Image: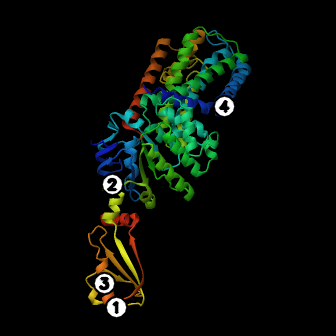
Amino acid sequence: MCVPPIIAVQRLSKTYASGFKALNDINLEIRQGEIFALLGPNGAGKTTLISIICGIVNPGEGTVLADGHDVVRDYRAARSKIGLVPQELTTDAFETVWNTVSFSRGLFGRSANPAYIEKVLKDLSLWNKKDSKLMTLSGGMKRRVMIAKALSHEPQILFLDEPTAGVDVELRRDMWAMVRALRDTGVTIILTTHYIDEAEEMADRIGVINKGELILVEEKAELMNKLGRRQLTLQLQSPLESVPASLSGYALELSADGSQLVYTFDAQGEHTGIDVLLRRLAEAGIDFKDLRTSQSSLEDIFVNLVRERA
Amino acid sequence: MNIYAIRAIYLFEMARTWRTLLQSIVSPVISTSLYFVVFGAAIGSHMNGIDGVSYGAFIVPGLIMLSLLTQSISNASFGIYFPKFVGTIYEILSAPVSPLEIVAGYVGAAASKSIILGLIILATARLFVSFQIEHPLWMLAFLLLTALTFSLFGFIIGIWADNFEKLQLVPLLIVTPLTFLGGSFYSIHMLPPFWQKVTLVNPVVYLISGFRWSFYGVADVSVGVSVGMTLVFLASCLAAVWWIFRSGYRLKA
């Protein structure tokens, strides 16, 4: 049975009053329960896309459905499913943690539930700060409060716009663990990030947006297989001056000092050609003392994709 | 109807009042008391009554109205401007809340604060001068209607303002002068005939006149006209707020 997408964006475009076209004919489906990472350089349209889905920015053309509800016509049902953690640390400085999280729950139409708020605050290690005013908290703690606010009304969909921007490594790891735990409870998570390793670490699927266009949506593993290059690096016993003519049929590169031979091959291909290459090297009398294979990172793929479209 | 949201916004705004009690309640009460001391007791004791009412008592409705107007505008404009300024407005815009519910929360809280303040000033005035309220229900109705209307007006100013200077501009340069020239301290019948006509352009004249009538049964203009003009202003503010949410003016890109 085909499960309907939790978020369905169809032919969405947005042009601001200034004339800047932020989104151009975006089509995107987010699956229930997945972690979807939206990557893109600054100004690519990530925040505009999220803002339209959440109701902060008016859509131009196209439609957006959240759990089957149109975000414009049926905004109450749509928005009640969604929690948003914006990029900026915007908080009511003079409010206490408890009050601001409780306020968010009420705002989203949920009756008071102190037990649930307590659970959220404990899960986010905020319980001992519940009576503290927000202005007394560190940046990382404020970020947690914003997540608590977004979770206060028990949303099915959580948008995290640059969730770990400006937080330290330890907190970042905590956040990742928390996001995974949320996903395990059935919450669909859509995150935008500048940190490619974050997407690589966490996402099930990845979308790349550039200049308002969604240029790619792919399973992370598939994406890395499809677009990632694999390389075999051989550390030679004796430096070479050039690649021997008998090996000219292989995609080989010799390092500047002649001590390394790098072979690039298709990761998806049935035959990588490594076995034959190693035999040819032996026949040519080229010995090596070490060898290793590597795969290009998501960052390499992302940079290549964006550069190609530039 | 998202009652929980209205309640959340309302209580959030009211909580700000209790947090800033000196600024919200004590300060306006002290400044109004000073008016009573200076104009009511000191100067007023040497003046003849107006329309059979002692001067000290005559200025009570005007002074309450002065505080009511300025505080309604100030509370409502700040209430919606501040989330815009610090960025927390994102939460209001992304919540399953209708424009009517947003307005009910913010304007309801601003009007409540103003009415509480108005009643406190009324009680304070009793310490300085003796007065009666001939039509208490009408007095409360004028209090409510004015607080509501000018809180809506303040809400519009808060949406329109994109800096703190603009937030103060309309209350200081337009509303306060109109209130002073609207008969807070005098009957417009004391003005030369030409200025009596000119002053009728001032909407505050109708509010103060109607409010004073509820106290002493005397008015500069008929009560029906006062109520009608207040309702016209209320309807204009409602129309402006409706347009703001429909167009997303200064709220949504």
Q: CA distance from mark 2 to mark 4?
A: 48 Å
Residue A238, by quadrant, is: bottom left
**Disc 2 on helix, strand or loop?**
loop
Could you say where residue A85 lies in the image, as x and y percent from the top left?
47, 46
For image coordinates 68% across by 29% down, the residue present is B26
Could you say where residue B153 lies in the image, as x and y percent from the top left?
49, 29
Residue A227 visible at all = yes
Amino acid carrying label 1: it is: Gly
Q: Which residue is mark 2?
A: A212
Residue B46 visible at all = no
For image coordinates 35% across by 48% down, the residue present is A16
Q: CA distance from mark 1 to mark 4?
A: 89 Å
Amino acid carrying label 3: it is: Arg
Amino acid carrying label 4: it is: Leu
**Dot placed on the residue nearer the N-terminal end, 2 or 1:** 2
**Dot placed on the residue nearer the N-terminal end, 3 or 1:** 3
Q: Which mark is drawn over residue A285?
A: 1
Image depth: mark 3 or mark 2 in front: 3
**Disc 3 on helix, strand or loop?**
helix
Kindly identify which chain the residue marked by label 3 belongs to: A
Kindly identify which chain the residue marked by label 2 belongs to: A
**Dot placed on the residue nearer the N-terminal end, 3 or 2:** 2
Q: Which residue is mark 4?
A: B21
Q: Which mark is drawn over residue A279?
A: 3
B230 vs A212, nearest the viewer: A212
